[in-house]
Image (cartoon, rainbow, N blue to C red):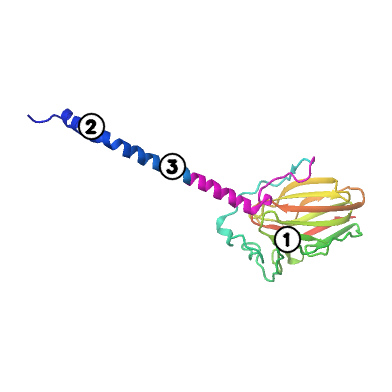
Amino acid sequence: MPRTRGTRWTSRLPQAVAAMPWLLASVGVIVLLLLLVKALVAVLGHDRYAEHGAGSRSEAVMVPGVPVTTGPASASPSPSPTRTRWATGGGTGVAPAATGRTPVASRSASPSASASVSPSTVALTPSPTTLLNDDAPGITYRGRWAVSRNRPFGDHRDDVHYTVHDGDSFSFTFTGTGLDYITSRDPEYGDADVWVVDSAGRPVKQQRVSAWAHRYQPQQTVFSVQGLPVGSYTIRAVKRGGVYFQVDALRVRG
């Protein structure tokens, strides 16, 4: 008597039952592998962040008790990957040659990450206004900075200091009633935290500024503090985002 469809399935049931442990074991192995890969990705991601340190995060808390205000410029978008052409291996030494808007005709050797270009600060006796170039004595650069000279873009004295590393900073101690931080705006430029303290270290002004713009704009005042009592103050700015962070000039108000 020929077997029906039901009898055929019934005859195969023992084989299916026998194969169930192997199937369950295979599924378990696949799940364990996926969990292992997920844990590995999480660990590697944490290590990559740890390499950059606290300076790689866009944190605005720098001076306790002082709120952070946001500058009028729009938020910086992610730079175009086609314009970011240097290796990101995290090496030290000379900063990579800038692409796009920052051709380097004559570049000075960059200091190490722990060194500064100008180890001392200078308290100037100001005139009504004093415009200082980015290479003026007393401006201290910390991190991996480079200099771009002979620029045809309209920058003050055709040169700028620049860095591509988040967490790099500059500082300057001045005597007067205020100061303007002058730099360039560009689609590849991002945010920086800027603050001013008095001679006792008390905060005077703190602000997150953006140097982003739709097109390159030289000699733009992105941070200003005015009307202070005549005295000694220190400005410090830290790169927080974007591709480039530049210093073109500082204007001291007497």
Q: Position of residue 232 (x, y in %)?
A: 89, 53
Q: Nearer the viewer, mark 1 or mark 3?
A: 3
- Residue placed most toward the observer, 251 or 123: 123
Q: Please tell me which residue is depicted at 80% across the width and 61% down the height of the picture.
A: 139
Q: Position of residue 155 (x, y in %)?
A: 73, 62
- The image's mark for residue 114 is 1
Q: Nearer the viewer, mark 2 or mark 1?
A: 2
Considering the whole magenta stretch, tell me its main secondary structure: helix
Do tag 2 and tag 1 residues touch (Cβ < 8 Å)?
Answer: no
- Residue placed most toward the observer, 243 or 151: 243
| Image-based side of 59 in relation to 132, left or right | left
| Image-based side of 122 in relation to 77, left or right | right
- The image's mark for residue 13 is 2
Region of the chain picked out in magenta, as a range: 37-65
Instruction: Name which residue type carries label 1.
Output: Ser
Q: Please tell me which residue is depicted at 28% across the width and 37% down the height of the picture.
A: 19
Q: Is residue 248 visible?
A: no
Q: Residue furthest bottom?
A: 106
